[in-house]
Image (tube, rainbow, N blue to C red):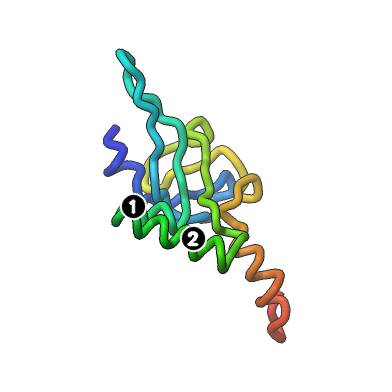
Amino acid sequence: MDLIKDVLDNQLVDRKDREIGKVDGIVVELRDGLPPRLLRIEVGPSIIATRLHPRFGAWVAARLHRWDKIRAEPTTIPWVAIQEIGINVKLDRDAAMTTAMAWENWLSDHIIRRIPGGT
């Protein structure tokens, strides 16, 4: 499997086929004398900003922490939670079990429900 082509930037879906973001990062453990081990995938604006430049990633993370404590930390999903890799990266868990939906939940609770006709 080509991790960059097959996983990075692909759509993440939970077990109910709800889209919960894109794979922004892959964390691999390098071990002496052993093959690398896939640990987790990461989702979040600071992760994708770090791909552009580490300082930019740190700047984005600091701004998020200051402005939006809900989504300041990236969502990390253990590699063992990946059920299937295809067009989408399908997880074996519900989106509610991750922090990927935190921003959407906050918007729904604080903004959408206050709009007439919003639910």
Structural crowding at the residue carrying mark 1, measured as other residues with C-alpha within 10 Å and reported as few (<14), some (14–19) or many (≥20) = some
> At x 62% / y 58%, what residue is drawn?
102
| Quarter placement of the N terminus | top left
Name the residue beneath numbered marker 1.
Answer: 54
Is residue 115 depicted above or below 100 in this figure? below
The picture places residue 7, in percent across and down from the top left corner, at: 35, 43
Label 2 environment density (alpha carbons within 10 Å; few <14, some 14–19, many ≥20): some
Q: Amino acid at mark 1?
A: Pro
Residue 56 percent location from the top left of the image: 35, 60
The residue nearer to you, when weighing 70 against 88, is: 70
Q: Sequence order check: which comes first, mark 2 or mark 1?
A: 1
Q: Nearer the viewer, residue 35 or 91?
A: 35
Q: Which mark is residue 62?
A: 2
Tell which residue pokes out farthest to the bottom in this image: 116
- Relative image position of residue 65 (x, y in whole percent): 55, 61
Amino acid bearing label 2: Ala
